[in-house]
Image: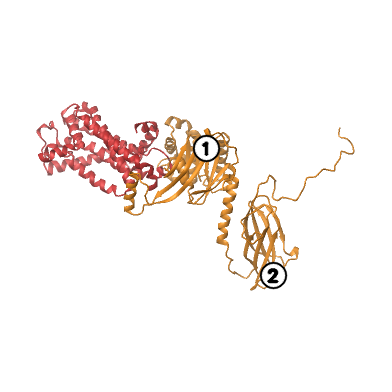
Chain colours: A red, B orange
Amino acid sequence: MPATVYTHRWLLASFLRRELGTRYAGSVSGAAWALLNPLALLALYAFVFTMVFRVRLPVDSGGASYTAFAAVALWPWIMFSEGVVRGMGCIQDNGGLIRKVAFPHALLVYAAVLSSFAVHLVGYVAVLAVLAALGEPVHLFRLPLVLAYLVPLALAAVGVAAALAALQTLLKDVEQVVSIGLTVVFYCTPILYPLSFVPESLRSWAAINPLASVVERLREVLLQGAGLLPADLWLWLAALVVWWAGLRFFERLSPHFEDFL
Amino acid sequence: MRLPAARPPSPAADVLVALQGVGKDYPKVTAGGDRLRTLWGLLARRADIPHFRALQGIDLRIRRGESLGLVGENGAGKSTLLKIIAGVVKPSAGTVQVRGRIGALLELGSGFHPEYTGRENIFLAAALMGLSRRETMERVGDIVSFADIGAHIDEPIKHYSSGMAVRLGFAVATALTPEILITDEVLAVGDESFQKKCIRWLERFLGDGGTLLLCSHSMYHVQTLCSRALWLHAGAARLEGDSFDVTREYLAFHEEKGRAGAQAPRPAQGLTPFVRDMRLERADGTPAEAVAAGEELVVQGLAWSPDGRPPALLFGIVRADGTPVYGAHSHDRGFVATGAGEGHFAFAIRFPGLMLLPGKYLVRLHVLDPEGLRLFDTQERGISVTGRTRDYGLVQLAHEWTEGSLRPSGPQAS
């Protein structure tokens, strides 16, 4: 599968350019929305969780404010969820192309997911820089390590999006289920709250969620200046399995997409 | 039915496209339950999916340098077959082997993004055909000049007319110089001069050893560009062979279909003479849509005249392109049609041995007033004349080759 991507890299580049271009084409402030949207969300969550619910962060969170605490996890989540949603719809959206031109359909999924990650990675870096400038304990020099978590996250997003895209092409109901499913996953993942808030009895269940590990590890790296752990290999393994299985499922159904579009 | 191919077969190594027993079933998905069952069937690779058959049992071999025309009615499976060869559609049965780089133009502006300018779309379309960005850069100039759509090249595709989109699509396809070019009815959209340009390009492409698969409703294009043709009917191959033979049979088939509709006598109308009914028959009275050269043809006619006086009649035969072949007047032959009741007059014109050269012709009947001065109505029927001959012109004139009687008498030339 990586070989397909390599031989068609020009097409992937073209799809990516198109994804990035159409995303904000026709809107006034263009790419600024890529940053404004998550910022607005962050402001909302910060308000609700510090003013209304008065969440108190545990002592070991490195002295970061709630806003920094949530921001570190929120952007990766937005990359993932937006990548999945866009990747899921890409077969449907490009029906005209699929019905007329022969090309590896998975490239569309890659382009959709990668564009989401690319756009929000820029926003992520910008927000972290601003937080650091405001005196939050963000370890900016640890930023390159972030890729060790975002790459598997992107691979997993490709796998999930590919499987959902294939299903969505045949069963239109998938879209509805996924929007609920993503909300559930969002609140089950310690993004807006620390994992220590989860009751002891449920914590082992929450820890199974690889997304929870990604989020927790990102906080440790960025807010506490921790390094990589050997256990991170498990994240890579899980991501590769999801990626491989999702694409297998996709490739099984992809010759039939044309019949259903 | 299989007619002999026009060209001698080249070695098997040069077969670029080989289809064997290819069929395509499209799943029928209307109800939600069907979709679930279909999904399960696809995952479990089972065959009992509710479906309808778009194509079945297609065997096809295309060799390097060959050009194959695909003809057939709407819904006969032409586009499906082209898509299977282009790799867009996976066949449900049979094997497909394709060697060589394919350039496919399936439908208008395939792969164009409406929000993007023509120039930006060139890059996407070229990438879809496997060109790198640098390779595309080198060819953009050629593409833009071939498409020849002026300043529109920098406008979004959504503002293009369908003709302009096709021009751009064709220009991109030509820039790739594929080994096999597949075009689906794209010539029909461009204007006259662009069509000529495309046809010139295709002729040069074929001359340079390119391989063409053309789907068209224009028999003219099929005949001029293709050496072979395949007629698809209801998802199956009906006839394959020399493009002239196949297109002629196909046109004859349509003539017959048209006749089936036009067969009923026309209702009485107005107060002027008209042709009530017209049929072409063989000597034994069976309907004739195609006759062999030299066979007997009978034109049966029924005319109506308002005042009960027999109208004057005129028949004419023209070739399909309108070239007159022959015509004659009933007055000049002293023929008067016999009354058939209620102002009708029946008549027939018999051609004992119709020596028209093979091709498509129209037989016309004209009804004039009894004095033969004013023309009131015209009806026509098409007829295909079949046969193999190397004679030229429209008709075969009776002749024989004999020993000459001229001798070199008089002043000697040397």
Q: Residue furthest right?
A: B410
Residue A31 versus residue B295 in the image, above or below:
above
Residue A151 versus residue B36 in the image, above or below:
above
**Residue B218 location (% of width, % of height):** 56, 48
Q: What residue type is labelled 1?
A: Phe
Q: Counting other residues with Cα less than 10 Å from the Cα at mark 1, is it few (<14), some (14-19), or many (20 or more)?
A: some
Residue B193 vs residue B5, the one in the foreground: B5
Of labels 1 and 2, the one closer to you = 2
Q: Circle 2 sits on which residue?
A: B338
What residue is rendered at 18% in x and 42% in y? Answer: A187
Residue B31 versus residue B154 in the image, above or below:
below
Q: Tell whether label 2 touches label 1 (CB within 8 Å).
A: no
Q: Is residue A24 visible?
A: no
Q: Distance between the Cα atoms at labels 1 and 2? A: 64 Å
Q: Which chain is disc 2 placed on?
A: B
Q: Quadrant of residue A6?
A: top left
Q: What element carries label 1?
A: helix
Disc on the earlier residue, 1 or 2: 1
**Residue B74 location (% of width, % of height):** 49, 51
Q: Counting other residues with Cα less than 10 Å from the Cα at mark 2, is it few (<14), some (14-19), or many (20 or more)?
A: few
Residue B10 vs residue A210, the one in the foreground: B10
What residue is rendered at 35% in x and 38% in y? Answer: A106
Q: Circle 1 sits on which residue?
A: B146
Q: How many marks?
A: 2
